[in-house]
Amino acid sequence: AVSGGVQEKDIVLDLALRLGKKIRSTYPDVKVIYTRDKDVFIPLYQRADIANQNKADIFISLHANYVSSPSVGGTETFTLGLHRSQENLEVAKKENAVILLEENYSENYEGFNPGEAESYIMFENLQSEYQGQSIDFAAQIQNMFRQNMQLNDRGVKQAGFLVLRRASMPSVLVEVGFISNPNERKFLVSEPGKEKITESIFEAFRNYKKAIDDRS
């Protein structure tokens, strides 16, 4: 997504590096693995495969939202599931459409077409054993966003994201705000904004990790 000269890919890379650094400094025993640490394109299936091959305990996919209306704003966190609204489907279509930049995408994704609603029927019967943990983590993220930022809380939702479908661990897709909203775009590129977003996701990670450790 691109809006007002701001590119989603730049915002989320910066946030990912900040979040990883914060986790590493606080929890030296936690291994942080980036799907990318520079401005390169990684196909969707490879992002999940990186997590799977490293036997990751959690997968966090960071994004910035975009819609045609500049008045729409807020944060939302998704887990894998069947979309329950047209709005959720549209977000999934937008994020999944990145596969069109990949060579042999039809082969890699078994004929999946990100623009066809029929392609998403497959998610109806896809029940991950990690769904409960994913929802718990997503709720933690939205709770921290609500506490730390003045952005609209759009809640925890489910939709058919290819990048989450391939991940074999608890996983979330975080939309940190709308770059199509001028006020949020300004917030997303500001130093205070980036720090608040990073701190919010980190605190959610801390709470989630503590809950998992306590149960273990």
Image: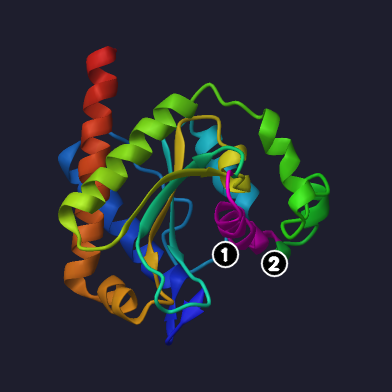
At a point 58% along the width and 49% down the height, the residue shown is: 85
Disc 2 is placed on an element classified as helix
| Dot label at residue 101 | 2
Three-letter amino acid code at the position of disc 1: Phe
Magenta: main secondary structure: helix
Within 10 angstroms of label 2, few (less than 14), some, or many (20 or more) residues? Answer: few
Within 10 angstroms of label 1, few (less than 14), some, or many (20 or more) residues? Answer: few
Residue 61 placed where, x, y %? 45, 50
Q: Tell whether 169 sits left or right of 95.
A: left
Q: Quadrant of the C terminus?
A: top left
Three-letter amino acid code at the position of disc 2: Leu
- Name the residue that disc number 1 marks: 41
Residues at discs 1 and 2 in contact (Cβ within 8 Å):
yes
Specify how the rendered protein is coloured.
rainbow
User: Is residue 143 visible from the viewing direction of this image?
Assistant: yes
Q: Which residues are magenta?
A: 84-99
